[in-house]
Image (tube, helix red, strand yellow):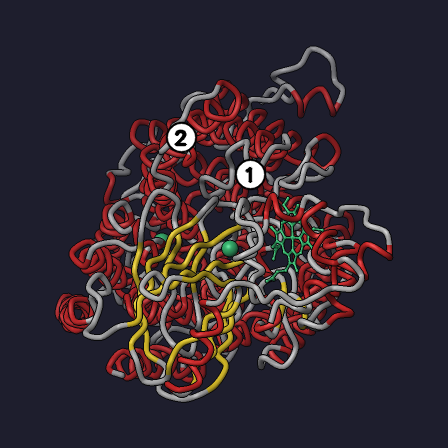
Amino acid sequence: MLVFGVIGIIFVITQGALVWSLIRYRAKGNEITEPPQIYGSNPIELAWTVIPILIVFILFLVTTRTIYSLDMQEPPEGALRVKVTGHQWWWEFEYPDLDFVTAGELHVPKGVPVFLDLRSADVIHSFWVPRLSGKTDCIPNRENHLWFQADEIGTWYGQCAEFCGTQHAKMLIRVISEEESEFEAWVANQKLDAPQVPTPLNGKEMFLSLACVNCHNVNGIMMQGGFAPNLTHLMSRDTIASGAAENTPENLKKWLRDPNSIKDECRMPNMMLTETQIDSLVEFLTTLK
Amino acid sequence: MIDKPYSPRSSKLHEWVTTADHKKLGVMYIVCGIIYLIVAGCEALMIRWQLAVPENDVLSAETYNAFFTMHGTTMIFLVGMPILLGAANYFIPLMIGARDMAFPRLNAFGFWLFFFGGLLLYFSFLGGQGLSGEEGAPDVGWFAYAPLTSTTFSPGSSTDYWIISLFVAGMGSIMTAINLVTTILTMRCKGMTLMKMPIFAWMMLVDAILILIALPTLTAIQIMLLLDRQFGAHFFDAQAGADPLIWQHLFWFFGHPEVYILILPGFAFVSEVTPVFSRKVLFGYPLMVIATISIGFIALGVWAHHMFATGLSPTVLAYFSGATFLIGVPTGMKIFNWIATLWGGQIRFATPMLFAVGFIAMFTIGGLTGIMLAVVPMDWQLSDTYFVVGHFHFVLFGGLLFAIFSGFFYWFPKVTGKMLNETLGKWQFWFLFAGFLLTFGPMHFSGFEGMPRRIYTYMPNRGLEFYNMLSSIGAVVQIFGFGLFVVNVLHSLRKGKPAGDDPWDAWTLEWSTTSPPPPWNFATIPSIASRRPLWDTKHPDDPDWKYE
Ligand SMILES: [Cu+2]
Ligand SMILES: [Cu+2]
């Protein structure tokens, strides 16, 4: 990159001149007179006014050209569209054209541009997956855009980059890029309602009878929430609570016993559940494939 | 000479509390600044302890957030500002040959506003409630972005503490700035035209003007935010439909100039120290003045470079990126002029000079990483990461703090009549220098790796452990540097070598009077013919005024 070159050269020149003069003009301790007093020099001073101006002008032109060429406002051809909503402290991903919602982990097909509409439900967040693109803020009452393309298969880590309150540090992002066919399969599953599997410990009834449904949606079972992550296909995620913990039955139990033990002060309250309640809830949650 | 002009009683405490003397106020500002420096330094140490290893739990999320907020707020408003106002207060009258500031009592009032503002801010540790409603100091970050500060998301009183205490302290700074501008413009001694002022006075003048323009913006939005929080106004309340970006624009309209408000005094210290210890006149004085003034102007037009990731339009991005590049030009002129001052001199490496040279080197690096951040696409990657944290600590620690130490070692003999210990001073420099590089160098890399700022913990195996460990070790090394400083000051105050009037063989007016200076500064008001009046006295055969 041009910038690195320019900066590297300036760095070497200034630090070099500095070190050189420090060594060369060190007082020997036996000087009797003061050194010659040099008050200034118009040509030299003009040089280090004009040359930097030229350098800066070139940098400006180059930057401006990239800014315009990287314009983020228009979706590229054939892009997959995802609505990203930042919440304190988790991410919601809605695929408007495919008509489903998920949280915490963003699945994308490899080699296809992904165009994001970025918004926020509460305070300012910033969507950032360093290896895929720069960051862009999610601001309430505004919509920002960002697009990227993952050219390899893999899991890309990122996280919220604008301080958004107590658990800003645990507002993590995972982008999972996969082959077209795998992605299609994932999408097909996400579009289904929650599977109707018998729960001998009465997990489903328990879930419906507790306040869970006031915050969480489960498609095909109860849709009055929206404040909290959609749980319809909870088990298709590797992590819970936006990457704060691995998605294992043990961690789910820990989470239900006290969400604060995983993510202190998070917006899901400690519901003071008994161990029996927790067991049957986790039984139900683990059916949400 | 009257010994105690102010107080009919002769209690020391009474004398300091009631004083309107610019020198006493200057000392009080600086002493407070150093105490807060230690406090905010301890907060930083806790931060580094927490981040030394991934998923550490030395601090809870709430405490961590309060500590980084208080660290930043304190360093800027209770360390940087008072030390620079204190130095200006103490030395401007001495350097321009005046007996005091233009408005001595306003001066005292400004100090006490700062003093109580600071106490109020720190009282929040006991009296405030943070974001989560639990006990604690402000935890919304030093730039307190809306709408996190609205009562919905920040129900506790700590945000009100943040607003009111900075409002009070800020009023003090505004008054002192008015005082400085008036003093510099109207109270210069005979012969001292503007272009014959010490460069220190020029930089402080521009600084005070910047304070006058920028700080009232902060004061205004703080009042608006207070109205939001206490009286249900909706200036920044996103849930009532407000646009939260307005806060950011107005805040950074203050916040960016604030960076220059802090660094200009650093320039001022270094521009006095470098010539004296190179035994040469400052190279290119007029260009320095021009550069200072242009920095002042440009600094007012670059604020949105803090907002490149908020979705600004390409035109706006291009403008603010260009303006930010442009400010590199006058800054560069200064760096070149300092180096040219060293060039061909007889450089004496006393402690003030070590810190001054450290300043020039580290500030240059901070400036260059700043240029990188001005490149918008790069900023999208690096903004709000540890790269930025590294960048501004090169500017404010390697830059401003080194300049402060440089000035401190240089003028301490004038203020107290005692020399600081040179050996301890040099050890302090090397400890700080090594600790500084070790702490803040690696931050650039952790930022590149993807570490956002203001996170109280991070995940293992994302390439961050090594850099964070280095930073934390660096913080420990710094403890020795600061420790030596405190020891040195306490020791030298009692047992330091007597300084004499002019220990460094320097050239500006403050060295012509006694150390410490008498209450009215000069027996007779001096009159001068050049920028270096003492050079003229010492070299009557070859005086400066012939060349200026
Ligand atoms: Cu966030
Ligand atoms: Cu700035």
**Image location of residue A112, percent across then percent down:** 30, 80
Q: Looking at the image, which residue is at 73% across and 48% down?
A: B493
Residue found at the very far right of the displayed protein: A275
* Amino acid, disc 1: Phe
Does A252 sit above or below residue A108? above
Q: Residue B224: image x %, image y %?
A: 42, 26
Residue placed most toward the observer, B184 or B75: B75
**Label annotation for residue B290:** none
Local SS, label 1: loop
**Residue under circle 1?**
B153
The mark that comes first in sequence, 2 or 1, is: 1
Name the residue at 65% across, 47% down: B66
Does residue B36 show up?
yes
Q: Residue at x 62, y 16 (%)?
A: B6
Q: Quadrant of residue A150?
A: bottom left
Calculate the distance from the C-alpha at mark 2 to the C-alpha at mark 1.
Answer: 14 Å
Residue nearest the viewer, comparing A212 with B294 = A212
The residue tagged 2 is: B240
Write down the chain letter for disc 2: B
